[in-house]
Amino acid sequence: MVIALIIIIFVLFYFFIIYNKFIRLRNMVEEAWSGIEVQLKRRCNLVPNLVDTVKAYARHEKNLFENVTESRKRAMNSSHIHERNNKEKILSNSMLKIFAVVENYPDLKANKNFLKLQEELIDIEDQIQYSRRYFNGTVRDNNIFVKSFPSLIVANMFKFKEREFFDLESIKDGIVPKVNLN
């Protein structure tokens, strides 16, 4: 009887430990996502300044500027991680098109405001990558715990689920000037 009571107490204690770890992992994932959202918002806030600076030089690229503005709006209005990931990829591609247009305007490439915006964007892209790595690490830990035995029993009881990774690619590689010494 005493042994059965000790086993029950041990199982309950282990159950509470697993449950608390799930709570900690959920909070870590949410905190990590919050870090990504902060950086994505910083990038979205930079877009109008970038568009305005390039627009002053490349007036005939009206469709491009409209597409970038629309992509920014859609990215900012998406809430689910999967949807946000897709919308941010579209925004990244739109921004790369702006930097492709810039290549045709040597005065713009030398403009101090444009260079400052480009540096800010590179810094933000670095911060997004750091935040993304942290987020994906916490998601990985959560997903392993959700699928591992015996924690999967607690996960199923309390509906703890696997989370989606955030795999946004950096646009930094597309905007950093390539130097060819050959």
Image: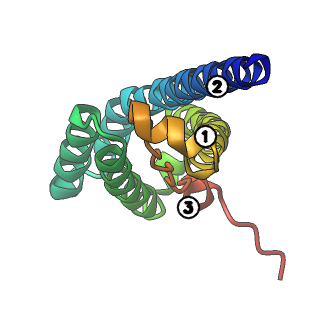
| Element type where label 1 sits in the image | helix
Q: Which residue is mark 3?
A: 174
Q: What numbered label is drawn on residue 151?
A: 1
Q: Residues within 10 Å of mark 3 (few under 14, many from 20)?
A: some
Q: In front here: 16 or 120?
A: 16
Q: Mark yes or no: residue 114 visible.
A: no
User: Residue 148, can we see it?
Assistant: yes
Horizontal side of 103 relative to 49 (left or right) equals right
**Which residue is depicted at the point 68% across and 22% down?**
17
Instruction: Residue 61: give x, y in percent of width and height.
Output: 22, 57
Q: Is residue 180 left or right of residue 55?
A: right
Which residue is denoted by mark 2 in the rendering? 21
Identify the residue shown where x is 37% and y is 32%: 44
User: Is there CB contact under 8 Å for labels 3 and 1?
Assistant: no
Earlier-in-chain disc, 1 versus 2 = 2
Looking at marks 3 and 2 on the same chain, the residue that comes earlier in the sequence is marked by 2
Q: Is residue 151 above or below residue 5?
A: below
Give the distance between the C-alpha atoms of the residues marked 3 and 1, in whole angstroms.
43 Å
Report the Cα–Cα distance between label 1 and label 2. Answer: 10 Å
Pointer 1 and pointer 2: residues touching (CB < 8 Å)? yes
SS at mark 2 in the image: helix
User: What amino acid type should be assigned to the residue bearing mark 1?
Assistant: Ser
